Image (cartoon, rainbow, N blue to C red):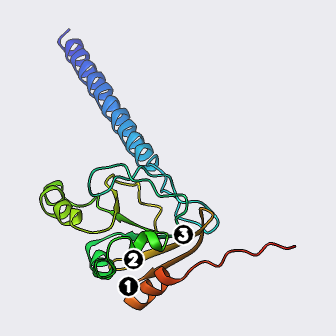
Amino acid sequence: MNQTKNQLTDNMFSYKFKTTFQFFKNSSLSLILLLTFSLSAEEPAAPTLVLGNVLPEINYTNQWEEPSPIPSETTKVIFIADMDASKIIHPILEKEGKGYLESKQAVLVSDIHRMPSLISKFVALPKMKSYPYTLRLVREEKLADPFPRTKGSLTLIQLKAGKITKIQISNLEAEIRSFLETQEKPSQSNR
C-alpha cells in the first residue's frame, strides 16, 4: 500500500510537472509568435515623393498657429528638416524681406516634430514669429516622412500645375538662390 501511495504521488507530481511545463512551453511559443507578428506588422513606410505626383496633403499651421495650406499657384517648395538646414535659408530670406517667397511662388515647410515642446514653445516659435515670411510647420511625427532629406541640406521641390517636376537637395546658397530665381516658362500652345 505504501508503495502504491508513493507511485501515485510520483505520478501526480510527474503529471503536474508535465502539464505546467507544457503550459509554459505553449505560452512562450505564443509570446514569441505574438512578438514576431507585431514586429512584422509595423506601419509601412510612407512613400517618398515621386516626380509626376502631387505633394502629400498635410494640414499645415504657420508660426502664428493659423492654418496655412499650400496655395494652388505654388511652383516651389523649400523643405527644412533640421536646424543646420534652417541656418542656410533664413539669412537668405531675411535679406530679401517680406513678400519675397510669394513673389517667387514659393513656400517654406519646416519639420519641427522632433523639437522638444519646451524649446519649441519658449525659444523656437517666438523666434519664428519674428520672421517676415510664413513658415508652414510639420508638428506631427511621420507627416513629413515622404520628403527626402539630407542632414544639413534643404530639399528643393519644383512644381508645375501642382505636380512634382524636380527634387533637388542642396546646402549651397548659390544653388538655393538659383532655384528661387528660376521662373518656369509657360508652355506654348500649338495654333
| Mark 2 element type | strand
Verify CB contact (< 8 Å) between mark 3 and mark 1.
no
Residue 106: give x, y in percent of width and height: 46, 70
Residue position for label 3: 75
Pick whichever, 132 or 91, lies toward us.
Answer: 132
Instruction: Point out which mark residue 171 bears.
Output: 1
- The C terminus sits in image quarter: bottom right
Q: Amino acid at mark 2?
A: Leu
Verify CB contact (< 8 Å) between mark 2 and mark 1.
yes
| Mark 1 element type | loop
Pick whichever, 133 or 163, lies toward us.
Answer: 133
Instruction: Point out which mark residue 67 bears.
Output: none
Residue 126: give x, y in percent of width and height: 16, 61
Q: Amino acid at mark 3?
A: Thr
Residue 90 as seen in the image, left or right of residue 164: left
Task: Specify whether residue 162 is in view.
Answer: yes
First in sequence: mark 2 or mark 1? 2
Which residue is pictured at 30% across the width and 71% down the height?
82
Q: Amino acid at mark 1?
A: Asn
Which residue is pictured at 41% across the width and 91% down the height?
174
CA–CA distance in space, label 2 to label 1: 6 Å
Residue 42 as seen in the image, left or right of residue 48: left
Residue position for label 2: 154
| Mark 3 element type | loop
Please tell me how many numbered marks the rendered image carries. 3
First in sequence: mark 3 or mark 1? 3
First in sequence: mark 2 or mark 3? 3
Mark 1: few/some/many CA within 10 Å (<14, 14-19, 20+): some
Residue 22 vertical placement versus 88 (above, below): above
Which residue is pictured at 34% across the width and 65% down the height?
110
